[in-house]
Amino acid sequence: MRTSVSEPRIPTIDLRPWTGGDAATRAALAATVDRALQTAGFLLVTGHGVDPKLPAGIRAAAREFFRMPAEIKRRYEAKVGGRGWLGPGAEANGYAEGTATPPDLKESLTFATAEPFDDPVVDAEWYAPNVWPAELPELRTLCERYLAQMAALQRELLSLLGCALDLGADFFCRHLDHPTYGFNINWYPGTEVVGEPRPGQFRIGPHTDFGTVTILDRQAGRGGLQVYTDAGGWEDAPYDPAAFTINIGDLMSRWTGDRWRSGRHRVLPPPADAPAEELISLVYFGECTPGTLVESLPAPLGRVAYPPVDSHVYLREKLDAITVR
């Protein structure tokens, strides 16, 4: 599908008309979302109602943690998909698409759903307690407030996505009665911390995300986010400090039978002309309730009929794939 000159491949969507507009306004906005997700898998979203002070507070507290000595950070060390600190060399996201890249040039604090489910096996894998750094008690308070707002925003976005397909606001949202999520605070330090990048090494290697929708609060930088589109190849992602960057993941792409594209992206290494550049991204990975059966929508909406998958069996396979062993 061609994109009109007046409508960028990655448009900015103001959610306020969606939540308070008339039927015609809502329908036009839903159609814009559908077109954008067919070409790039990305949107910018404003009017989301999330407290703008929270990301700054989280970054300040997390930066203190990341700057602590390694022996302190190792007290909170976790595996990929767990809760705690992912140190240097823990992940190589390019593995998920079969690219043998060097490990990603980042560290992360990673948290997830902690409210118990009704199955001890599922609880053990997906609802383990979060591990919060004792040195920074304010980080937990800030993150829990932020994550409550992320969960509400995820529900609103999935409502919009259901309507964009003329399937109704509840089509995806009915699978959110007890969803999991992943939340990463990604620290991208400069070369004084990570060293000179190796050939083919990125802060995060080329990949697509794994779940339904990803909600990203990012900082602009020369070694920042790039997105891939068929029309433009790799491009610097558009940036608006008031907007979240939204992309859909592989489960949503499968669900729509590839009508919508998983948003392929990467984060560039520290730039040679600004080697000390430091960025922190807050990444909320929206998922659904464990055991959700994801089946491709039939034609004419869907274009590819994938075999049905259990949402969390699929997610675990993807998380295992990016783990550096």
Image: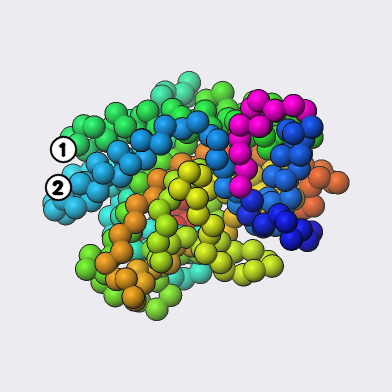
Query: Are circles 1 and 2 on residues that touch, CB within 8 Å?
Result: yes
Q: Which residue lies under the disc numbered 1? A: 135
How would you rate the neighbour count of disc 2 (Cα within 10 Å): few for under 14, some for 14-19, many for 20 or more? few
Instruction: Examine the rendered structure and indicate whether residue 288 appears above or below residue 325.
Output: above
The magenta region covers: 12-23
Q: Residue furthest top?
A: 118
Q: In this orientation, which residue lies closer to the viewer: 152 or 85?
A: 152
Picture residue at 14% right of the left edge, 53% below the top: 69
Residue 121 falls in image quadrant? top left
Q: What residue type is labelled 1?
A: Glu
Q: Residue furthest front?
A: 6
- Which quadrant would the N terminus be assigned to in this image? bottom right
Q: Which residue lies under the disc numbered 2? A: 72
Picture residue at 38% right of the left edge, 58% below the top: 91
The answer to whether one can see residue 222 in this image is yes
Q: Left or right of 23: which side holds 102?
A: left
- Which quadrant would the C terminus be assigned to in this image? bottom left
Q: Mark 2 or mark 1, which is nearer the start of the sequence?
A: 2
Q: Left or right of 11: which side holds 243?
A: left
How far apart marks 1 and 2 lie (CA) works out to: 9 Å
Q: In this orientation, which residue lies closer to the viewer: 91 or 157?
A: 157
Instruction: Examine the rendered structure and indicate whether residue 137 appears above or below residue 246.
Output: above
Q: Which residue lies furthest to the bottom in this view?
A: 199
Q: Assess whether residue 20 is covered by the magenta stretch.
A: yes
Q: What element carries label 2?
A: helix
Picture residue at 59% right of the left edge, 55% below the top: 263
What numbered label is drawn on residue 124? none
Q: Assess whether residue 122 is covered by the magenta stretch.
A: no
Q: Nearer the viewer, mark 1 or mark 2?
A: 1
Q: What residue type is labelled 2?
A: Ile
Could you say where residue 30 lies in the image, as x and y percent from the top left?
Answer: 73, 39
